Image: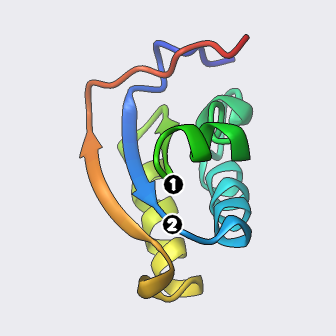
Amino acid sequence: MTTHQDHHYSVTVETKDVAVLHCLRALAHYAQETGNKMIAWGGTKRPDWERHGKRVTFHFSDARYRSCFLTEAQRLLCHPLWTNVCESDQDPAVPQS
């Protein structure tokens, strides 16, 4: 099982649409093929999204999983609905309380 420290490949996205937020959460779960899938979308609930100005950060344990997430998001969700704000290879997930 992966730990939060293992999930250090991140991508921060912005969307103004709460339905798109939930689609992105599902895509993060899909893209994180192994390990603790829930870490990938931890901290991306609606209150988190609202608190962070309609932005959330997803964390993956492998750069390939992040790439899969972005590829599928581009394929399934029109770009005006969401944007890739930034990516990092050294941004470990933080445990949620």
Q: Residue at x 59, y 84 (%)?
A: 76
Q: Amino acid at mark 2?
A: Thr
| Residue at (47% x, 19% y) in the render | 6
Left/right placement of residue 80 relative to residue 88 reads right
The secondary element bearing badge 1 is classed as loop
Q: Which residue is rendered at x = 59% and y = 46% of the image?
A: 49
Q: How is the image coloured?
A: rainbow
> Where, quadrant-wise, is the C terminus in this rendering?
top right
Q: Nearer the viewer, residue 82 or 5?
A: 82
Residue 90 in the image, given as x and y percentages of width and height: 26, 25
The disc, 1 or 2, on the residue closer to the chain's N-terminal end is: 2
Q: Distance between the Cα atoms at labels 1 and 2?
A: 6 Å
13 and 36: which one is in front?
13
Q: Mark 2 and mark 1 in contact (Cβ < 8 Å)? A: yes
Q: Which residue is mark 2?
A: 15
Disc 2 secondary structure class: loop
Query: From the viewer's perspective, is residue 90 above or below residue 84?
Result: above
Report the amino acid beneath label 1. Lys
- From this view, report whether residue 4 is shown above or below residue 62: above
Query: Callout 1: 10 Å neighbours few (<14), some, many (20+)?
Result: some
How crowded pointer 2 is (Cα within 10 Å; few <14, some 14-19, many 20+) is rated as many
Identify which residue is drawn at 65% across, 61% down.
Answer: 21
Residue 23 lies in quadrant: bottom right
Where is residue 86 drawn, in percent x and y? 26, 50
Q: Which mark is residue 54?
A: 1
